[in-house]
Image (cartoon, rainbow, N blue to C red):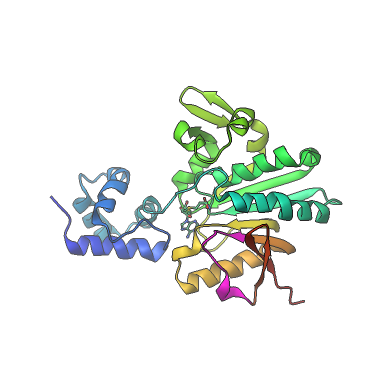
Amino acid sequence: MACSDSDYEYLRELVLAQSANVIDPSRNGLFESKLTPVVRLAGASNLEQFVKILRVERRPQLQRAVAEAMTINETSFFRDRTSFEMLRETIFPALIRLRERERRLRIWSAASSTGQEAYSLGMMLCENFPLLSDWDIKIIGTDLSREVVETARRGRYRRLEVNRGLPVQMLVKYLTRHGEEWEMNARVRAMCEFMQVNLCGVLPEMPVFDLVLLRNVLLYFPRQDRTHVFREVRRRMAPEGYLMLGNAEQAEDSTKLFHVEFSSGCYFYRPVNTA
Ligand SMILES: C[S@@+](CC[C@H](N)C(=O)[O-])C[C@H]1O[C@@H](n2cnc3c(N)ncnc32)[C@H](O)[C@@H]1O
């Protein structure tokens, strides 16, 4: 039995209420394909019965599972190469000078999806800045979706995933093959930690970050959510810190919090210090 238009409308509203960064929810067929595991988890035999359960029981855990299943998790290693080149040429050298006394760096990959962004940062630091080998470095990856956080923690990727963006010499240097999968090496994994965090909700205790990557997530957020996220990110950044957005994103509605700078073909943001 198929879902009615009002069932799809119900799902659309439920998903958009929790996150705007979702697969085009106007395509009904996507609910059928993406929600299959959640429908099974709820013990329903099809999507229509699942919506009935949701409407009656309003189980928050199930509602969150629906939103998580519909999020856009697209990512890859060294995604947007120019951004990583800029990090290597401009931001990391500046941060290393800034923190040479503490020998400590804290980095946040907010909306880290399946972890490629965080691991790319780890590999870049090992590869280009050997003097950091005895520094205290933490790269914290966070995401709304529990499933992608678990994948990131496993640190194992299929051929198709390692073929996207990861140069072959880095693949063989930093990952080990296990059958059909490649596993990130222990040194890079030790630098990276992953946890489930909703950027639009109450954020947990976190360190003060020297660098935040908030890429390809805010694009579809409504203004009030963007403002909330920028404010929360700013509160967790060092006054001398750096913020990077995705190539197609701008912090134009947060000019009181950040000012924009440009280097090596990329924009990035620095906190406006009011003190
Ligand atoms: C398109 S991926 C971007 C991944 C990575 N930053 C990159 O640029 O390759 C967007 C990620 O944002 C996550 N996301 C969506 N809404 C979120 C929210 N409210 N809080 C935290 N993460 C969210 C999704 O689960 C998804 O993994």
Name the residue located 15 percent from the left edge and 52 percent from the top edge.
2
**Is residue 183 visible to the viewer in this orientation of the structure?**
yes
Please identify the residue farthest to the front as the structure is shown.
265
Above or below 172: residue 192: below
**In front of the other: 244 or 262:** 262
Q: Would you say residue 253 sits in the magenta stretch?
A: yes
The answer to which quarter of the image holds residue 19 is: bottom left
Left or right: 51 with respect to 81? left
The x and y percentages for residue 23 are 36, 56
Give the position of the C terminus as an image quadrant: bottom right
The x and y percentages for residue 267 are 63, 63
Name the residue located 52 percent from the left edge and 69 percent from the top edge.
226
Name the residue located 61 percent from the left edge and 64 percent from the top edge.
233
**In front of the other: 18 or 255:** 255
Name the residue located 46 percent from the left edge and 47 percent from the top edge.
146
Q: Would you say residue 70 sits in the magenta stretch?
A: no
Above or below 266: residue 132: above
Left or right: 12 with respect to 163? left
The number of callouts visible is: 0
The x and y percentages for residue 196 are 52, 51
Please identify the residue farthest to the left as the structure is shown.
1
**Is residue 193 visible to the viewer in this orientation of the structure?**
no
**In front of the other: 166 or 30:** 166
**In front of the other: 65 or 12:** 12
Q: What stretch is highlighted in magenta?
A: 244-255
The x and y percentages for residue 24 are 34, 58
Please identify the residue farthest to the top as the structure is shown.
179
